[in-house]
Amino acid sequence: MTTNSTPDKQRPDRLTIRIDKMVYWVSRHWLALLNTIIAIYIGLPILAPILMSMGATRPAQMVYTIYSPLCHQMASRSFFIGGEQYAYPRELAGTDLVPIEAYMDGIPEFAAASPDPAQWATFLLPARRFLGNATLGYKMALCERDMAIYGFVLLGGLLFGLLRRFRTVKPLPVWAFILFGLGPIALDGFSQLLSQYGTALPPLSFLNAVFPLRESSPFLRTFTGAMFGFMLVWLTYPHIDKGMQGTEHDLEQKLHDLGEL
């Protein structure tokens, strides 16, 4: 039987108590909740090509559509499942993988696209629309860099949950996040973007003097995304955890005094 240690005139209403209980639960389980959400978020893009390979095209296309506003989804910058290779980068990326240009003639979506990397504007939308086929396999619903970012946010979250059992994890200094987390992804992404703008838009051709036309490799996309995701966890999760512990302590005392725990 629950006893009330607070006089009725001071006792919060039931809605307030329910909200306090919900916030208390979240403050205790925030990391597990966040890790679960992120696992689902990166799990669905992996599931999409598997569904396509199984012939379940409708649910797979729903996943691609849901993630479409969140990512460029270019085939040349995405991981593939069920095909000859795990990725099909542009030839300009300079990898040992067979480039996507070698397959373009047989892919209807690329009928109007130019294999010339300088004509990248004609390639963008076809690469976005192409989901894959039986030969190449099917692309994930998030690009390589995004998969690395969220994958290492999840990995970092799991590692943080393990480490905090044994010690207090100090947050990464902001300068270190900027240098090691934000710096590589910004340099790789913006140097590629500016090089392509300089090639496609004559008024911006001066950019190519500093940023020659280039295309990042799957390794660079994955590495810079992984660094950003992991460093982001190291920067933010210790602060979040400290705040949640304070909330948990305050609400635990409040709910205990009300006889609700």
Image (cartoon, rainbow, N blue to C red):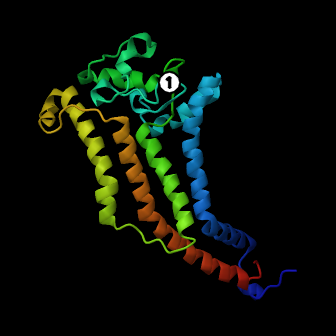
User: Which quadrant would the N terminus be assigned to in this image?
Assistant: bottom right
| Amino acid at circle 1 | Leu
Front in this rendered view, residue 43 or 126? 43
Image quadrant where residue 20 sits: bottom right
**Residue at (31, 63) in percent of width and height:** 176
User: Which quadrant would the C terminus be assigned to in this image?
Assistant: bottom right
Classify residue 46 as left or right of residue 4.
left
**Residue at (27, 42) in percent of width and height:** 190
Q: Is residue 172 above or below residue 254?
A: above
**Residue at (30, 16) in percent of width and height:** 114
Front in this rendered view, residue 55 or 243? 55
Query: Residue 129: percent from the left, percent from the top?
Result: 46, 23
Whether residue 94 appears in this view of the structure is yes
Classify residue 132 as left or right of residue 25.
left
Image quadrant where residue 112 sits: top left
Residue pointed to by mark 1: 131
Whether residue 11 appears in this view of the structure is no
Q: Is residue 1 above or below residue 24?
A: below
Q: Is residue 35 above or below residue 224?
A: below
**Residue at (23, 23) in percent of width and height:** 118
Query: Residue 249: percent from the left, percent from the top?
Result: 61, 79
Query: Residue 17: percent from the left, percent from the top?
Result: 71, 73
Residue at the right extreme of this rendering? 1
Helix, strand or loop under label 1: loop
Image quadrant where residue 197 sits: top left
